[in-house]
Image (spheres, grey):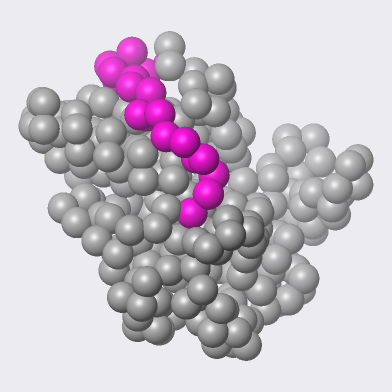
Amino acid sequence: MSTEATEPVICFGQQPCGFLPRRFLWAKIQTARRIQAEVGGRIVFFFHDSDHDPRETQTVLQEPDNGKEHRINFRFANKIQKKYSPLYAKSIAPEWIQKTLRQLPKFMRRETVEVFNAIETNNAADYCLEAYRKLGLLDGIEVLRSSDPELRKAACEVEDYYVDTDYEGETVRARWDPEKGLRLHKGGSAFIDLSAQDWGKHQLSPCRDTRLRWMQSIVRCTHYIAGEGELKYLKMEETPEIEFIQRDAIENASAAYLP
């Protein structure tokens, strides 16, 4: 992978954010396409599928007749996966897929329902990404996944990170604490301390404050489309070579985007 951009590289990042993407992701995509039309180059979607928060995949749908809101999220294989596994390692409970498919016609057109009928994976991150692709949202866009071991090995070193490791037979995302070692956050001030173990760079993913520098060491983008929340914590001074652009405004940003 080249270490210098020879053309504009327009990047946006996002966790899997629902089996139908939230409207703020659609706004990032549209903003990236607008910038591409102005400056040329290519678009990269940095898919943060190594994040573990199950709330990220909640999908907010409204009944078209009355506007009644429904929040639908995956059911995961077990409690450990739900709370601690990265999204690329969360398995969807088989009964969830069929149950949800039966509900979808009251929210969307038949053609959109057929997109989900054609998805064959039971992995949460794969399911979201395949849906976005089948809906045509990512046409002409390169996708890089933060879970990719080769990508991780090519990234720069960061001092604040998570380690994908084993816990009770599952892959979990444990925070590295220089004083305490690998830990799983149970909630509040409670943690599960994992046994001492070795790990490789291919198991590492960055924390929020080191994510931009880590991602940029791989993507080498010239433009970055940032959401409103991102602009509050991104350390833009660490990457002065990037032109940061706030995504276009959109109403009801956390609701699902329906084509």
Q: Main secondary structure of the magenta part?
A: loop
The location of residue 204, given as percent across then percent down, is 53, 49
Instruction: In the displayed orientation, state which residue is furthest to the front.
Output: 65
Residue nearest the observer in this picture, 81 or 225 = 225
Q: Is residue 252 magenta?
A: yes
Q: Is residue 7 left or right of residue 207?
A: left
Identify which residue is drawn at 79% across, 58% down.
Answer: 195
Residue nearest the observer in this picture, 89 or 21 = 21
The location of residue 168, given as percent across then percent down, is 76, 73
Instruction: In the displayed orientation, state which residue is furthest to the right.
Output: 189
Residue 182 in sight in this render: yes
Quarter occupied by the N terminus: top left
Magenta part of the protein: which range?
238-256
- In this rendering, the answer to whether 215 lies above or below 134 is above
The location of residue 152, given as percent across then percent down, is 41, 49
- In this rendering, the answer to whether 151 lies above or below 133 is above
Identify which residue is drawn at 39% across, 83% down.
Answer: 117
Q: Is residue 122 magenta?
A: no
